Image (tube, helix red, strand yellow):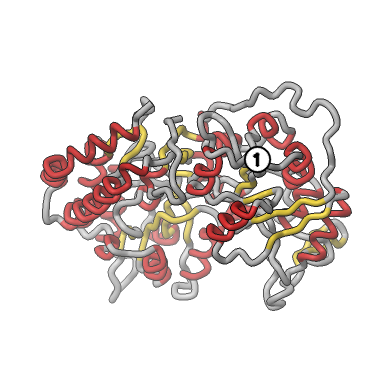
């Protein structure tokens, strides 16, 4: 991993702030020094105080019962510190006061990198990688948030990312079997959607829609390669490069400009927010949309059939040289370095949360009789304590995105699981890195310049080749200054 510099309170994070490491299918196993970490007795803490923004049990949804259930399971009292609306400010105040919790959720990557490099968090590398919880886990998720090859927080979920959804009912109606295996086949499919117009008379089919034209999360069918983007990214040799100088970025811009010119991509994609793109997809006139794997598979289906009852939406496997990107872990638990019993905290909280048994059930689905019941061997969710008209969905950690596979008695829906399986089979893991504060103004200037230029390229006011040449002419000095800093060993 690149050298990471100590920063002030705020780091800059765009997709400049992450880089793609390796494909999940080939991610190497990681390990700490391991041996002897758990030798000898582990002191059980009397109480564990938890400060979190997401890692928190919802008030008024059975928190008292949850804490009692945790005590019965562990013999430890847990206290969730509430009232964290302005979370970053609250954490900074608590740290300044010295009255530190036993566990804190460090916002990723800003707070996490800053606190780790300033010695505010325990190094949990050896505890984590020697723990039984890593057996069968997606350890590359933890690898992706190491700093100088050390881990300072325990991840609970993978970050997730996007997969491309298609109107399967339209494919069936047009007699098209299978999905695109190459860019050329994907391009021809967009043409087919445009020309055959399966949306029907009085409506015009939009072959593809996107939320913006910069972020490869929403455009991985267009930008080829693991981590291509019109931004800084890390290449296969471990060097951070300027994406606007990369041949694959040029290919992506050429494809986007072609799709825009031939009315294959929604013209409003350039300025679309994710919500605007979703809303247009729900109207039933869009064929393909690259969006989040998981429950959004159900959401896209359920909201579209409200307008088009016959709609069937399915996730497509990525085609050749097209890779969805998995964000770094966002829900994590760190132990402040002043804590005198980190092994006890790890053993009685982290290992309980991911024990593949009653602890994982408690952390992921709540308390029996409050959030769920088991009747005749069948598990059933109970009504939510705040809104009884819906079933409870309370949890400390999101069971859908867990990186610790287990026999979940409340499995994902078939649609959700299908999209997650496709995503996890093909996703490339992203990693965090920090930016030296001396170049933050340069990074911001280059981001603005790229965004304006990419919009002009896609709309056809300048060719991709000429646009990139203009960028080189105007910004190469700033690019080289930034690269020298980002690649400093």
Q: Please identify the quarter of the rendering in which residue 63 is found.
A: bottom right
Residue 464: x %, y % from top left: 16, 46
217 vs 246, left or right, is: right
Q: Please identify the quarter of the rendering in which residue 184 is found.
A: top left
237 is higher (above) or lower (below) than 168? above
If the image is split into quadrants, where does the C terminus sit? top left
Residue 368: x %, y % from top left: 83, 61
Residue 200: x %, y % from top left: 32, 71
Residue at the image position 53 percent from the left and 57 percent from the top: 88
The residue wearing badge 1 is 337
Q: Please identify the quarter of the rendering in which residue 348 is found.
A: top right
Residue at the image position 42 percent from the left and 60 percent from the top: 167
Residue at the image position 79 percent from the left and 63 percent from the top: 372
Residue 426: x %, y % from top left: 48, 39
261 vs 426, left or right, is: left
| Along the viewing direction, whichever of 284 and 334 lies nearer the viewer | 334
40 vs 28, left or right, is: right
């Amino acid at each position: 991993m690149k050298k990471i510099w100590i920063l002030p309170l705020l780091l800059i994070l765009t997709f400049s702030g992450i880089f793609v490491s390796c494909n999940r299918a080939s991610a190497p196993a990681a390990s700490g020094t391991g041996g002897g970490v758990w030798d000898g007795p582990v002191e059980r803490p009397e109480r564990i105080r938890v400060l979190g923004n997401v890692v928190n049990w919802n008030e008024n949804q059975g928190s008292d019962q949850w804490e009692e259930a945790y005590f019965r399971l562990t013999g430890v009292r847990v206290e969730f510190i509430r009232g964290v609306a302005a979370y970053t400010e609250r954490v900074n105040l608590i740290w300044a006061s010295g009255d530190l919790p036993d566990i804190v959720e460090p916002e990723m990557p800003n707070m996490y990198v800053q606190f780790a490099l300033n010695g505010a968090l325990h190094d949990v590398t050896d505890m984590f990688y020697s723990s039984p919880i890593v057996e069968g886990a997606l350890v590359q998720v933890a690898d992706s948030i190491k700093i100088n090859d050390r881990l300072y927080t325990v991840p609970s979920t993978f970050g997730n990312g996007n997969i491309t959804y298609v109107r399967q009912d339209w494919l069936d109606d047009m007699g098209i079997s299978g999905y695109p295996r190459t860019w050329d086949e994907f391009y021809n499919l967009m043409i087919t959607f445009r020309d055959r117009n399966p949306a029907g008379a009085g409506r015009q089919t939009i072959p593809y829609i996107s939320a913006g034209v910069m972020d490869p999360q929403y455009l991985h069918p267009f930008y080829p390669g693991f981590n291509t983007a019109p931004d800084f990214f890390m290449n296969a040799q471990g060097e951070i490069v300027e994406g606007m100088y990369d041949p694959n970025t040029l290919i992506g811009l050429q494809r986007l400009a072609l799709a825009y010119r031939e009315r294959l991509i929604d013209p409003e994609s350039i300025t679309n927010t994710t919500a605007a793109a979703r809303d247009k997809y729900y109207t039933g006139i869009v064929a393909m949309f690259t969006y989040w794997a998981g429950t959004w598979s159900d959401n896209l289906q359920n909201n579209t059939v409200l307008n088009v009852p016959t709609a069937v939406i399915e996730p497509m496997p990525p085609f050749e040289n097209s890779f969805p990107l998995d964000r770094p872990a966002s829900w994590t638990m760190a132990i402040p370095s002043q804590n005198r019993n980190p092994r006890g905290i790890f053993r009685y909280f982290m290992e309980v949360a991911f024990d593949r048994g009653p602890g994982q059930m408690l952390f992921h689905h709540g308390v029996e009789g409050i959030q769920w019941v088991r009747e005749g061997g069948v598990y059933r969710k109970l009504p939510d304590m705040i809104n009884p008209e819906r079933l409870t969905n309370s949890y400390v950690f999101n069971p859908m995105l867990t990186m610790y596979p287990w026999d979940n008695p409340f499995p994902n829906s078939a649609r959700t699981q299908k999209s997650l399986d496709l995503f996890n089979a093909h996703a490339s893991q992203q990693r965090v890195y920090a930016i030296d504060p001396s170049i933050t103004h340069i990074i911001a200037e280059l981001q603005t310049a790229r965004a304006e230029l990419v919009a002009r390229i896609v709309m056809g006011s300048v060719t991709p080749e000429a646009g990139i040449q203009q960028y080189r002419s105007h910004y190469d000095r700033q690019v080289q200054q930034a690269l020298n800093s980002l690649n400093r060993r």
